[in-house]
Image: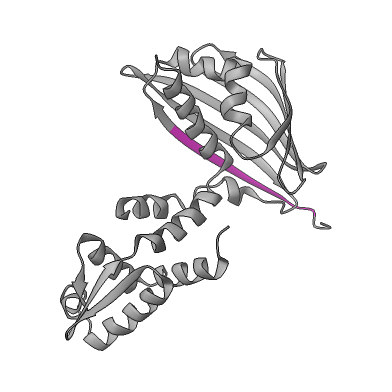
Amino acid sequence: MAERSVVHDTIVTERTYDRDPSLVFDAWRDPATKREWFAEGEGWRVEEYRLDFRVGGREHGRFRQGNGVEIRNETVYLDIVPDRRIVMAYTMTVDGAIISASLGTVEFEAVGAGTRLIYTEQGAFFDGAEGPSSRKQGWRGLLESLAEML
Amino acid sequence: MLDQSAVDRVFHALGDPTRRAIVEQLSRAPKSAKDLTEPLHISLAAVVQHLQVLEESGLIRTTKIGRVRTCQIEPAGLRVAQQWIEKRRSLWERRLDRLGAVLAAERK
């Protein structure tokens, strides 16, 4: 890919879970649990996963898709407020080529007995590789109206 | 694996507001072509044309009993659209759904 470009985009994703914030936060803090939902489940082979969850600590993931393509995830934790907030910076590379560099903020809000989780990603997406489109939610409205019909 | 031409046909069919209105009508209950003319305020000929596109896309199926052609939703057709969209949902959307599944499984 000869093209050199940067697209900036912000993605906001929300979920409400019926567990209290400390339990939801634990799923981000504990390496085994984090690995389970963050690294596993995409159908990628997890070749390496390490999480050092503290300010200044790093998270490193190396994955292999079925077609042999290698994906790497490098994260550094910038701010951690237990049960309230996590701020991290991370890059993604595909076969050694960096495709994005992002600031990710996770907010945990107590809602009744549950937790509203808000994930905001402010990213720079490079060289047209995948672009922000695959992380975007433009199709969300359509998906929801389809879900209603189904 | 998703059949790309099937995906093309489904989204082409759903790209038209009148055809989406037909899908909405039929998702409530099966109807005849004639029944569809009234809520949509279009001619029977126009309805029949749209139904043909919808049927070719696999979104609906029609059955003729006597002189009446009844149209109904074919759920498999909408599933094609849903699967295509699902594949394009963001990595984080999928991750946060898995986080929900992990939290639910932890519940004792």
Relative depth, front residue between B100 and A45: A45
Residue sitting at 32 percent across and 72 percent down?
Answer: B61
Residue sitting at 32 percent across and 16 percent down?
Answer: A113
Residue at the front extreme?
Answer: B66
Is residue A138 visible in the rendered image? The answer is no
Is residue A122 visible in the rendered image? The answer is yes
In magenta stretch: residue A125: no
Relative depth, front residue between B9 and B62: B62
Residue sitting at 40 percent across and 17 percent down?
Answer: B107
Quadrant of res A34: top right
In magenta stretch: residue A6: yes
Q: Is residue A9 above or below residue B20?
A: above
Residue sitting at 19 percent across and 71 percent down?
Answer: B31
Residue at the bottom extreme?
Answer: B45
Q: How many marks?
A: 0
Where's the N terminus of chain A, which quadrant? bottom right
Q: Is residue A131 above or below residue A10?
A: below
Please, which colouring scheme is shown?
one colour
Q: Which residues are magenta?
A: A4-14
Quadrant of res B54: bottom left
Find residue A10 and report its horizontal and vertical position in percent: 57, 41
Find residue A150 and report its horizontal and vertical position in percent: 33, 53
Q: Is residue B106 left or right of residue A149?
A: right
Q: Is residue B4 above or below residue A56?
A: below
Quadrant of res A94: top right
Q: Main secondary structure of the magenta part?
A: strand
Find residue A43 and report its horizontal and vertical position in percent: 63, 40
Relative depth, front residue between A52 and A49: A49
Q: Is residue B56 left or right of residue A90?
A: left
Find residue A18 and report its horizontal and vertical position in percent: 36, 22
